[in-house]
Amino acid sequence: MPRDGRRHLSSQRPSCLAVTWPPPPPPPPRTARATEGRRGRAMSAALAVARQRLLGAARGGYNAALRHGIQTGVQRLQDLTEKVAAKETESQSLTDLGPLILQRNSMRWDGKTYEEIPIAHIKATYNNTHIQVVSFDNMPFARTSCGTEGFQNAKKGTAIAAQTAGIAAAVKARGKGVFHVRVMVKGLGPGRKAAIKGLTMGGLEVISITDNTPVPHNGCRPRKARRM
Amino acid sequence: MANHLRFIGRTVMVQNGNVEAAYGALNRILSHDGIIDDVKRRRYYEKPCRRRQRLAYEACRRVYNAEMARKLAFVSRKNRQDPWLGC
């Protein structure tokens, strides 16, 4: 009696090995420029077709997926335990920062507590970067921006300009006796990282970075989408 | 953020003077929480019809990527029982 191992395996071939699974993803939605008009209707029809195909394939492969699911259930458990172990090592490196924030009360910089160290506000807009170094009770030390450093118009919205402004602000603050600074960044502009680098290059020591980007909980309506 | 305590949320302490690593950690945390995408999206108004299309597209994409990852994990298995044992 011949071994029917080969026949047995092929009948058990899971559906996910078939060429048609998974079905190709729907194309991304068009941006504001090209969505209106006939093309828009065709795009939404294609999206609907893709979604129906996905649902149909899911229903058809259900039985095969059941059998396949039992087989891979054990493997998924193994993968899960591996992932949990990996996440624990990752979270260990992240929670090293956690206790650091909690230990902040006992850390001193030049004999000052964390709450007494001056703050460097960096406002990184898309067209410019402003830097202001302030004491903990809002007494100003230094204020620079890309414009005060001699850049004009489009050149203000660059990383190099932000770095120059950072160096200048650091030098001014150093002259007034500021050594350590905690940074508060606002906005997602090109000068966001470069300004911090400029502060470090100018001689100030950054001890913490906070992100203060304003996120409205659906407040004011922003301007309309650009059509380029 | 004005209603919350300052320097507690979205804050990363700099360890050993490594400002680059601290900034990278902050960026990773923010993008993982979806704040950076949210701020970029709120730069211009997203009409409700665009928003519905985008959410549907992201859902389909998520399903597709999960299924593809599952398929790849299945196809690239190495440790399994020998199917031709004894023959």
Image (spheres, rainbow, N blue to C red):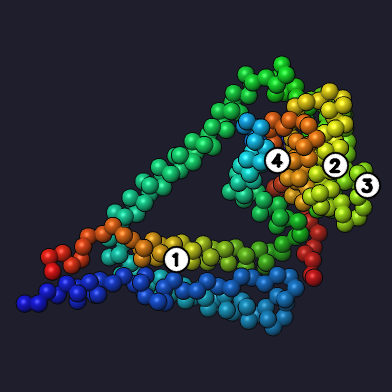
Dot 1, how many residues are within 10 Å of its Cα: few (below 14), some (14-19), or many (20+)? some
Dot 4, how many residues are within 10 Å of its Cα: few (below 14), some (14-19), or many (20+)? many
Residue A194: give x, y in percent of width and height: 76, 45
What secondary structure is marked by label 1?
A: helix
Q: Which residue position is annotated with label 3? A: A150
Subunit under mark 3: A
Is A177 on the left-hand or right-hand side of A206? right
The answer for how far apart the CA atoms under marks 1 and 2 are is 47 Å
Is B54 on the left-hand or right-hand side of A22? right
What secondary structure is marked by label 2?
A: helix
Subunit under mark 2: A
Query: Of the numbered discs in the image, which one, if any, rests on residue B68?
Result: 1
What secondary structure is marked by label 3?
A: loop
Q: Which residue position is annotated with label 2? A: A165
> Which is more toward the observer, A17 or A177?
A177
In terms of sequence position, does the residue under pointer 2 or pointer 3 come before the other?
3
Q: Which residue is found at the position 29% from the left and 54% from the top?
A: A74
